[in-house]
Image (tube, rainbow, N blue to C red):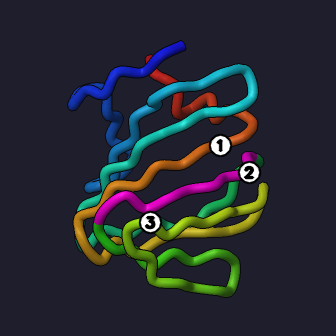
């Protein structure tokens, strides 16, 4: 499967938080997120392991009882079933990989 970058295909997850499945296989999913300044991604947990990289902007990522301000190039790993959330400090773009695939993030 190939992915050609396009400005379309984003799903609104929450106000100011948009997700697009870029490419996926049987066991992994690569998604892009567009995040608007001032928005909050509420704390949540899911059975997928998640790794990510901030492409642009600035966020404060909360993983369990730790928080870190992240800037472009910074990366993270969130184990399965661990509570996490984020404060969006600037308009931001992030890329994340989920394993296994998050079915709710697949294109319709």
* Distance CA(mark 1)–CA(mark 2): 6 Å
Q: Does the magenta portion include 63? A: no
Q: Residue furthest top?
A: 1
* Label located before the other in sequence (1 or 2): 2
Label 3 vs 2, first from the N-terminus:
2
Q: CA distance from mark 3 to mark 1?
A: 18 Å
Toward the viewer: 89 or 76? 76
The image position of residue 23, as x and y in percent, is 52, 26
The residue that appears at 78% across and 55% down in the rendered structure is: 80
Would you place residue 67 above or below residue 43 in this image? below
What is the CA distance from the residue labelled 3 to the residue labelled 2? 20 Å
- Give the residues drawn in magenta, as a range: 48-56
- Marker disc for residue 98: 1
Residue marked by disc 2: 49
Q: How many marks?
A: 3
Q: In the picture provided, is 15 more to the left or to the right than 23?
A: left
- The image quarter in which residue 22 lies: top left
| Front-most of residues 45 and 61 | 61
> Can you tell which quarter of the image residue 99 is in?
top right
Mark 1 residue element: strand
Would you say 90 lies left or right of 48 here? left
Q: Quadrant of the C terminus?
A: top left
Q: Pointers 1 and 2 in contact (CB under 8 A)?
A: yes
Q: Tell me the tag on residue 73.
A: 3
Judging depth in this view, the residue of 90 and 18 nearest the camera is: 90
- In magenta segment, residue 51: yes
User: Going from the N terminus, do you reach mark 3 or mark 1 first?
Assistant: 3
Does 35 sit left or right of 103 as displayed? left
Residue at point 56%, 32% (across, down): 104
Which part of the image, by quadrant, shows the N terminus?
top right
């Amino acid at each position: 499967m190939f992915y050609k970058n396009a400005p379309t295909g984003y799903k609104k997850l929450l106000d100011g938080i948009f997700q697009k499945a870029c490419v996926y296989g049987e066991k992994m999913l690569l998604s892009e997120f567009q995040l608007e300044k001032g928005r909050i991604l509420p704390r949540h947990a899911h059975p997928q392991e998640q790794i990510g990289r901030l492409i642009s902007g600035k966020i404060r990522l909360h993983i369990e009882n730790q928080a870190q301000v992240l800037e472009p190039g910074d990366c993270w790993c969130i184990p399965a079933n661990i509570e996490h959330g984020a404060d969006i400090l600037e308009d931001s773009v992030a890329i994340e990989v989920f394993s296994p695939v998050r079915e709710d993030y697949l294109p319709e």
